[in-house]
Image: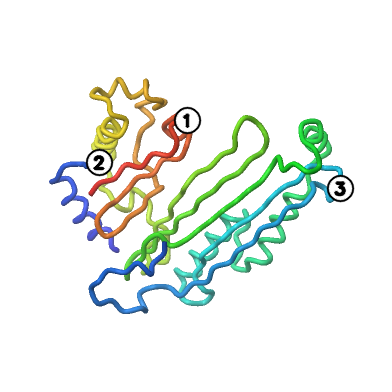
Amino acid sequence: MTKIFLKHILLTLLAVSISCCSTNKDKKAESDDMHYPSSVYAFDTTGHANSKPENPNFNYSYKLEIPNDGVSPCADSIRMSIIASATGYKKSDLEAAKKNKLEDMIHVDEEEEEGFKEMFGSTETPWSFNCESKCSFEDEDVYNSMFKFSSYEGGAHGFYCTKYELWDKAKAQRIVFKDIFDEDFEEKLSTMIVDSLCKIMKVKKVDELTETGILDIKDIHPNNNISIDRNTLTFNYIPYEIAAYAVGELSVKFS
């Protein structure tokens, strides 16, 4: 999807009120070759830190829908990005990246090891990392990846979030906020997002948003956590990004 085409869509959005996989296709005739062939890889393991049975456990798992290797330059870029998000290693070889991730999780320093042993028994799992990915939308121009993350490293609660990556298939590169909108539009869009949040949080005045758990109105801006479908463009905000953890994730849709 070109920058010009996206701008035409967004100009249309401004004229109206604000208000998984790629197999869910439009009923109109479409050719299958616009969709990247993909495979699903799943992995789940639990082990003891530093491979000592007396130590608490770690857990690492993923379920990844990844474009097959060698389909196109963009598919390969998406593949590498998904693997990097799930493992922390930018590799096209998932097995090699998984091995590196497991080595990172198994080996902890002595201070961290002792700290967890004081709080948790050998049958407990005080730290974990989980990632699930899939294609949330795809057409001939763009590919939208969705990631669901959850982790726990002790403490009162774990952390979770949903992140999206939007890709230009022709250019084989990520589409970010500034690729879509005119340079002078960020301030206007920020105001539109704040107005939408007022509706979502059911308040009448902007000043009342902080009473609902929104952290600071000045920090609310469009981000690059963008999801799309044929009818909407959505800015997604993870916990702590613009609101307290208890508020959860927030999604602002323009449709």
Q: Amino acid at mark 1?
A: Ala
Q: Work out whether 172 lies above or below 198.
A: below
First reached walking from the N terminus: tag 1 or tag 3 = 3
Q: Quadrant of residue 197?
A: top left
CA gap, disc 3 and disc 2 = 57 Å
CA gap, disc 1 and disc 3 = 36 Å
Q: Is residue 205 left or right of residue 116?
A: left
The residue identified by callout 3 is 52
- Looking at the picture, how far across and down is residue 66, in whole percent? 51, 67
Compare residues 88 and 17 and report the one nearer the observer. Answer: 17
Q: Work out whether 55 lies above or below 82.
A: above
What kind of element bears circle 1?
Answer: helix
Q: Residue furthest front?
A: 123
- Looking at the picture, how far across and down is residue 45, in whole percent? 70, 56
Which numbered tag is attached to residue 184? 2
> Which label lies toward us, 2 or 1?
1
Q: Quadrant of residue 94?
A: bottom right
Q: Which residue lies at the image location 38% right of the left edge and 56% below the top edge?
A: 175
Quadrant in which the N terminus is drawn: bottom left
**Looking at the image, do the residues carrying marks 3 and 2 touch, with CB atoms under 8 Å apart?**
no
- Looking at the picture, how far across and down is residue 173, in whole percent? 42, 62
CA gap, disc 2 and disc 1 = 33 Å
- Tell me if mark 1 has few (under 14), some (14-19) or many (20+) residues whose alpha carbon lies within 10 angstroms of its own: few
The residue identified by callout 1 is 246
Compare residues 41 and 186 and report the one nearer the observer. Answer: 41
- Tell me if mark 2 has few (under 14), some (14-19) or many (20+) residues whose alpha carbon lies within 10 angstroms of its own: few
Q: Amino acid at mark 2?
A: Asp
Q: Work out whether 120 lies above or below 87.
A: above
